Image: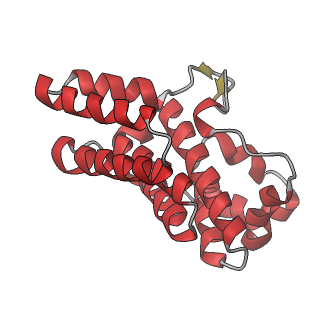
């Protein structure tokens, strides 16, 4: 049933909206409204806590990314930003974000899966995401988008469908999609949590 459940959203013909801008006003399960998460704002807030030389270096890289039209150069710059946030700053959310930007430009199953699994790991393990519903919804939507793109490149990959199902099970926003009778197994898994 999980296989068919994860396959369901892919049959829609409408394009997937960008996860960063998918929701103007998000709702929690108890109808409590929350402000949407902005990765750009989050990165700016994280940069503000850094020493001036580190902040300036990251800003210069960001300017270069925005100026270049060459996708190969953008990929290299995003990889450098990802590495810098990982090794020097040690902040997981920007790392996953830049990894996803690389994956979207490379458009390979391998990079999309790696980026999607980075977000899945954050959803499952990162306290800053688990405690912030807006971040969790954003990370979930980003993971769903990445896994759906990877599945479109390799429709026979059941592992990707399981990863996508894991995101739906862990996500605050996607729990309503588990209500149909077809999704009985997923609902049972969610209730055992």
The quarter of the image holding the C terminus is: bottom right
Residue 126 appearing in the image: no
Above-or-below relation of 5 to 63: below
- Residue 110: percent from left, percent from top: 51, 70
| Residue in front for this viewpoint, 134 or 64 | 64
| Residue in front for this viewpoint, 183 or 16 | 16
Find residue 148 and report its image quarter. Answer: bottom right
The quarter of the image holding the N terminus is: bottom right
Horizontal side, residue 4 vs residue 89: left or right: right
Horizontal side, residue 119 vs residue 48: left or right: right
| Numbered label tally | 0
Residue 22 appearing in the image: yes
What colour-coding does the image apply? secondary structure
- Residue 51: percent from left, percent from top: 12, 26
- Residue 5: percent from left, percent from top: 77, 64
Identify the residue at image location x=27%, y=30%.
60
Find residue 35 and report its image quarter. Answer: top right
Identify the residue at image location x=48%, y=35%.
135
Horizontal side, residue 17 vs residue 41: left or right: right
| Residue in front for this viewpoint, 107 or 23 | 107
- Residue 141: percent from left, percent from top: 61, 44
Identify the residue at image location x=50%, y=57%.
103
Above-or-below relation of 61 to 184: above
């Amino acid at each position: 049933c999980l296989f068919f459940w994860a396959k369901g959203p892919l049959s829609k013909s409408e394009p997937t909206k960008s996860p960063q801008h998918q929701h103007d006003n998000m709702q929690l399960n108890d109808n409590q409204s929350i402000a949407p998460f902005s990765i750009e704002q989050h990165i700016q807030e994280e940069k503000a806590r850094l020493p001036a030389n580190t902040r300036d270096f990251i800003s210069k890289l960001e300017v270069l990314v925005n100026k270049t039209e060459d996708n190969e150069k953008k990929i290299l710059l995003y990889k450098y930003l990802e590495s810098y946030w990982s090794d020097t700053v040690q902040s997981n959310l920007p790392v996953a974000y830049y990894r996803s930007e690389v994956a979207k430009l490379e458009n390979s199953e391998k990079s999309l899966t790696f980026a999607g699994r980075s977000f899945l790991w954050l959803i499952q393990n990162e306290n800053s995401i688990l405690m912030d519903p807006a971040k969790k919804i954003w990370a979930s939507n980003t993971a769903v988008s990445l896994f759906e793109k990877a599945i479109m490149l390799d429709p026979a990959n059941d592992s990707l469908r399981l990863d996508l199902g894991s995101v739906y099970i862990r996500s605050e926003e996607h729990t309503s999609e588990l209500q149909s009778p077809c999704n009985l197994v997923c609902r049972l898994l969610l209730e055992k949590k």
